[in-house]
Amino acid sequence: MSATANTKGAISIRNLTKIYDPDGVNVMAVDNCSLEIAAGEVCMIVGPSGCGKTTLLNGIAGFHSITEGEIYLDDELLCGPSKPKAEQGADRMVVFQHGALFPWKTLSENVAYGPMVQGVLKKNEALEKAGHMLAEAGLGDVGHKYPGEVSSGMARRAEIVRALINDPKVLLLDEPYRAMDSLTKSIMHEALLEVYDRTKVTIFFITHDLEEAIFLGDRVAIMTTRPATIKKIVDVKIPRPRSYETLSSEGFRKLVDETKEAVHEEAIKAFEAGERELA
Amino acid sequence: MSEMNLTTPKMEKPTGLAMTMHQWKTALQTKTPYLMTFGIALWLGAYYLFVEGWELPRFNKLPGPVEVITEWLNPDPDWGMSLFTPEYYDHVTVSCRRILISFGIATGVGVPLGLFMGWSKVFRDYSFPILETLRPIPILAWVPLAILMFTGFETPVIFLATLASLFVTTLNTLLGVDSIDDDYFRAAKSLGSKQHHIFFHIVVPGALPFIFTGLQISVGVAWFSLVAAEMVSGEFGLGYLIVDSYMNITYVTMVIGMLTLGFTGWASSVIVRMVGNRMMQWRLRALALEGR
C-alpha cells in the first residue's frame, strides 16, 4: 500500500452472528461472518439490499448488540460475548445513509460539535478549526448555512468533514451516496478519494453499487443474501491516486465483469426469497 | 427561486422600512390578500343580509353587523361599552393578563415536563398514565374543584386556563421528542456527547417544531378555557363581559365581547408563531427554499 500507510484502525470481525427477534420469530441477519480489514484500507461491502450489511456496521459502531462472535479494533475488543454491544465512540465515525447533520445547526456548528462536546477544543477554537476544514473540502462559503439550505452533495461532504475533525480511526459509511444522481455521485467519489489520499483513514463503506465499490476500494467484500456471510473478496489492484479515467480503463472494466456474476447471483436469491429488508 | 438565490449570493437584503415595504409589495402580488378580503366581505354580507337586510326569522333577534360596529365605534355607546369606554379596556387587559400568566406557567411547566418525559423512559413511565387520565377531563368539570381549592376570583380562573393549556403543551413537546430521528441521537453519541449535551443540543432543538405547533394550539386552548372560567367565576374579563351582557340583555355588547375575543386570540397566536419562526431560522430557511 501507500508509503504513509496508517497504523491505526484495523478492524477484525470474527465469526459474527446476529439474530434479530421481531415478534418472537428469529431472523438470522448475519451468519458466522469473518472479515479482516487492515489499518488504512478502504474496504467496500457489497451485497443485495437488506442482506445484513448495515448489521455489520451497527455492530462496529455500537448501535446494536451482536449475538455471537467478536469485533476488534486494533486488537482491542469492541464487542464480544462478554459485552454484546460496543461503546459508541469518536474513534469510529459514521456517515449515515440518510444524512444526520443536525438540521438546527449550521454546517460550521455541526463540524465543531464533536471537539466541543468532547472538551478537546473551546467553542470558538472548534468553530475556527471547522471553518478551516470546511474550506479545505471546498465548503468555505457555506459554513454559515443550515443543512436544509445546501445541496445533498454539500451536506454529505460536510458530514464527512464533521467525522474527520475528530481524527477517527475508522470511517463507517452506510450507502452515503445512494439517493444521488450519477453526476453528483462522481463528484462525491472524487472528494472522498481526495480525503482518503490525504488522511489514509480506514474506510468501511457499504454500497450495492459494484462500480462504486471497485472504483473506491482496496478490497471489495461481496456478501451473500440473508443470512449474510462473505461470499467472495475481490482485491482491487488499481493504483492510487485514482481518477475518473480509471473508470474507462481496461483493468477496471475487467474487474467489474469478473465480479458482476457473483453479485447478480445473490441479488436473484434475495429477490426470490422476497423477504422484507432488515436494517 | 432557489437557483436564483444561489447564483446571486452577494445580493444585499433590504432591511427596516425598505424590507417591510418590499414584503407588502410582494404580498399584494399574490392572491392571498384579495381572497382574504373577499372571504371577510362574503361573511359580513351574509351576516348583514340574514339579520338586518332580510330579517329572517330567528336571525332578526340577533344584533346585526351595522348595529354592532356602530356601537363599537360610538364615543357615547347606547349600551355602555365601546372602544371609547375605559371599562372595555379593563376587560381586555384583565383577560390578557390572565392569559399571559396562565400561558406562561403552562409553557414553563409543560415544555420541560414534556422534554423530560420524551427523554427519560423512566420518567415517562411514572408520569404518562397520570397525564393521560387527567387530560380528557373537560375544563368545566374542574370548575367546582378549582373553586374549592383556591380562594378569591383570580386564582381559580388562572388555574383553569393553565391546566388546559398545560396538557396540550406537554403532550406536543413529548411527541416532538419522539419525532426526532434516531440517527441524530446516534450521531451525537458517536461524536462524544454526554447526556446533558444530548438534552440541550438534540432533544430541545429537535422538539422545537412540535413545541411551537403545540404552543399555538395551547394559547388558543388557554383562551377558551379562560373564557369558560370567567363565565363561571370572575368579575372582569371578556368571558365575564359576554355572560354579563347576556344576563342584562345587552346583546350588542355581547357580540362586541365575542369579536374582541376573536381578535385578541388571533393576535396571541400570531405572536407565538412569530417567536417560533425567530427561534427556528434553520427550519424557516429550509422551507423557504422549498417554496413554502
Image (cartoon, grey):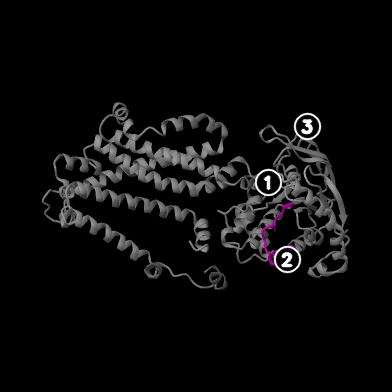
In which quarter of the view is residue B192 placed? top right
Q: Residues within 10 Å of mark 1 (few under 14, many from 20)?
A: many
Work out whether residue B233 can be spotted. Answer: no
In which quarter of the view is residue A217 placed? bottom right
Name the residue at 77% across, 44% down: A226
Q: Residues within 10 Å of mark 2 (few under 14, many from 20)?
A: some
Dot 3: element: loop
* Mark 2 lies on residue: A186
Residue mark closest to the camera, 2 vs 1: 2
Which of the two discs, 3 and 2, labels the residue nearer the N terminus? 3
**x, y percentage for residue B52?**
16, 55
Q: Residue B190's mark?
A: 1
Which chain contains the residue that carries disc 1?
A: B
Amino acid at dot 3: Ser
Which chain contains the residue that carries disc 2?
A: A
Q: Residues within 10 Å of mark 3 (few under 14, many from 20)?
A: few
Q: CA distance from mark 1 to mark 3?
A: 21 Å
Amino acid at dot 1: Ser
Q: Is residue B19 above or below residue A117?
A: below
**x, y percentage for residue A228?**
79, 44
* Mark 3 lies on residue: A82
Q: Which residues are magenta?
A: A172-189
Q: Is residue A261 magenta?
A: no
Relative to B255, A222 lies left or right: right
Q: Residue B162's mark?
A: none
